[in-house]
Image (cartoon, helix red, strand yellow):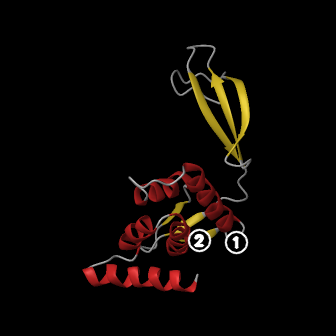
Amino acid sequence: MRCPYCQSEDTQVKDSRPAEDGVAIRRRRVCPVCGGRFTTFERVQLRDLIVGKRSGRKVPFDRDKLRRSIDVALRKRNVDPDRVDRAVTGIVRQLESGGEAEVTSDEIGRLVMDALKSLDDVAYVRFASVYRNFREAKDFHDVLGELRSDEDVD
């Protein structure tokens, strides 16, 4: 692993432990050249995913971008970070085990909506407003109606 400070390729692992409910390994590393310390995470990746955008463009799937999108929706909401990690891991597992190497951004958006619905209603509405491209207040009203009808079912 290359040192992020001095770019030396000779770093040493000082500590390893399971992370994210055993789905990843967290490693503390140190660089013998500059003394810099940093953390890396190692995860199993079942396949390389390609995301088909609405514009027709294709880009590699980025787990960190998925996490950032969820974090934006959850900004200033009191949600346990471990629950968020489990949601992200669950979404990635669903995508990787889906059988297709290419997934659509719409499919990812639907999975994020489902995850946010179980994490936080406000975050769900925030994400929905961008994902569904809300244009007027009625759009918010409709999503709130969906949430109410889902609560009635439970």
- Given residues 31 and 138, the one toward you in this image is 138
Residue under numbered circle 1: 98
Task: Label 1: state its secondary structure.
Answer: loop
Task: Label 2: state its secondary structure.
Answer: strand
Question: What is the distance, in whole Å, between disc 2 and disc 1 at their CAs?
Answer: 9 Å
Crowding near pointer 2: few (<14 within 10 Å), some, many (20+)?
A: some
Q: Residue at x 59, y 21 (%)?
A: 8
Task: Determine which quarter of the picture holds residue 38.
Answer: top right
Tell me if 86 is positioned left or right of 116 in this view: right
Mark 2 and mark 1 residues within 8 Å of each other at the beta carbon: yes
Residue 97 coordinates in the image, percent (x, y):
72, 67
Up-down relation of residue 14 to residue 127 (above or below): above
**Mark 2: which amino acid?**
Val
Residue 39 coordinates in the image, percent (x, y):
60, 32
Total numbered labels: 2
Up-down relation of residue 6 to residue 69 (above or below): above
Tell me if 102 is positioned left or right of 133 in this view: right
Task: Determine which quarter of the picture holds residue 72.
Answer: bottom left
Residue 66 got which mark?
none
Q: Quadrant of the C terminus?
A: bottom right
Tell me if 140 is positioned left or right of 85 in this view: left
Could you tell which of marks 2 and 1 lies nearer the N-terminus? 1
Residue 15 coordinates in the image, percent (x, y):
71, 27
Q: Quadrant of the N terminus?
A: top right
**Mark 1: which amino acid?**
Gly
Tell me if 17 is positioned left or right of 107 in this view: right
Crowding near pointer 1: few (<14 within 10 Å), some, many (20+)?
A: few
Q: Residue at x 51, y 80 (%)?
A: 151
Residue under numbered circle 2: 103
